Amino acid sequence: MASLIMQMLEGTVTSLRIFFLTLIFSLPLGFVVAKGKMTAIRPVRWLTDLYIQIMRGTPLILQLIFFYFAPFYLFGVSYDRFTACIVAFVVNYSAYFAEIYRSGLQSIDRGQHEAAKVLGFTRPYTFFHIILPQVIKKIMPSLGNEVITLVKDTALAQTIGVAELFRVAQTASSREFSTVPIFIAGIFYFVMNYIVSRIFSVAERKLGYYR
Amino acid sequence: MERMIQLENLSKSFGETEVIRNISFSIEKGEVLSIIGPSGSGKSTMLRIITQLERADDGTLTVDGETLFRSVGGKAEYDRSAERRIGLKTGLVFQSFNLFPHFSVLRNVMEAQRAVLKRSREEAEEKAMALLRKMGLEDRARMYPYQLSGGQQQRVSIARALALDPQILFFDEPTSALDPELTREILHVIRGLAEEKMTMAVVTHEMHFAKAISDNAIFMDKGVIVEEGTSLFSDPTEERTRQFLSSFEGDD
Ligand SMILES: Nc1ncnc2c1ncn2[C@@H]1O[C@H](COP(=O)(O)OP(=O)(O)OP(=O)(O)O)[C@@H](O)[C@H]1O
Ligand SMILES: [Mg+2]
């Protein structure tokens, strides 16, 4: 039992690495994608839109397989499963975050930009001090949902053989002819998401000082 | 008298629609100009061009002796180096206030002083508090915009604009989002500024008010100035002006 828990904790570490690496890259990248989707340059907007459509329109599990095998079939190079997994997650989640950012940016009244312009704020100052704080508040709930989904989605990494929590649990489960490891994994995911949702509700409360 | 605004032959189209056609007028220092006219006549667009929220197609604009754009070969040629400097001389008060909701009232009035004019915290705060006091909002300084009435929000936005010491302040229907009581509040503030000889241009549908405070007035329709001068309120010469004003009769 103790060794099972140890194995599962190791799996959890892998899951958490996927989780954090995905967030570190896709949270900022999502902004770049959102900008691409909102640009006046038509080909860029069109390509960004296509990319987002593909990411949202196909299963993540398929994208994982694609990013793991495509480099080999296309260029004859292969890289390790973990890297492939991070690439797939980042590419996928950037698209989802981009849509969240875009809806947030578009929900800000034009008058905010205009007031800032008339008062003489520079464009970067306007973005970072006037617009972004309001966007963050607006998108907090949908961002929270997406991050919770990410915790659960990390389980898909097993498709390309990454030994994350769920894979460890399944392996242990078939080895010991018992579903107990699966249930333990369920508790682990639940705890992780409990923490995530607490963090988000604290953040939402902190941002609740204005409307 | 010295000239604050000199606008000559301004034209502006949005796509195919010509919104401003060859408009010229001037505002002297210390003068209050009121701009009236039906919806869609181009009043906002004109203010937005002078305050640089829109670009002119053609014409010449001089603000306090500095030229923002000049008509060259049928096109408005902007002086890039003057844009920012002139922008700081002009202030604009919006119909919808457009306060920054995530900043306290005090910070709304301080932020541009700090970030744009690089004033010290002490100086900016002192200035902001003085203006809030003047607007009767001293005790609201620590509150957030959502906690204020529309009239109070508009007074904060006037304080925010005044904090940068503009040479001229533009108002685009500052009371249209307010009920009659709050409207009086704002008109009272504007009247006070007029008494202090603040140079202002006010787009408004409050005819009695406009008549009372204006040194000059223009009536716009379909992108042109139909009639000019305060006599248009009491003794309009153009039929179009008469018709427009009669639609306000019985109003207060
Ligand atoms: N950004 C824009 N793009 C296209 N058309 C515009 C734009 N802004 C204004 N217009 C058009 O220009 C015309 C003049 O608009 P403007 O807002 O200047 O009128 P206004 O006199 O301020 O009217 P109101 O009293 O309703 O505020 C209108 O027909 C309007 O639809
Ligand atoms: Mg208007």
Image (spheres, coloured by chain):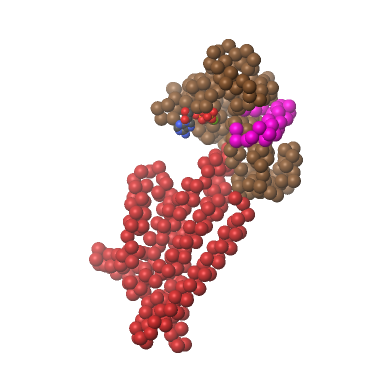
Chain colours: A red, B brown
Q: Does residue B80 belong to the magenta stretch?
A: no
Q: Going by the image, does B204 lie left or right of B79?
A: right
Start-end of magenta stretch: B176-202
> Residue A116, image x and y in percent?
57, 42
In this picture, is B27 found above or below A63?
A: above
Horizontal side of A176 relative to B226 (left or right) equals left
Q: Residue at x 35, y 73 (%)?
A: A158
Q: Position of residue A126 (x, y in %)?
A: 55, 46
Query: Residue at left 45%, top 68%?
Result: A151
Quarter containing the N terminus of chain A: bottom left
- Residue A143 is left or right of residue A155, and the answer is right
All told, the count of numbered labels is 0
Instruction: Give me the residue at 62% from left, 13% from top.
Output: B235
Using the image, determine if residue B103 lies above or below residue B63.
below
Kindly indicate the quadrant of the structure image that contains residue B185. top right
Rendered image quadrant of residue B43: top right
Give the residue at x 31% y 65%.
A62
| In the image, farthest residue toward the top | B237
Ligand number 2: quarter of image: top right
Relative to residue A56, is residue A109 depicted above or below?
Answer: above
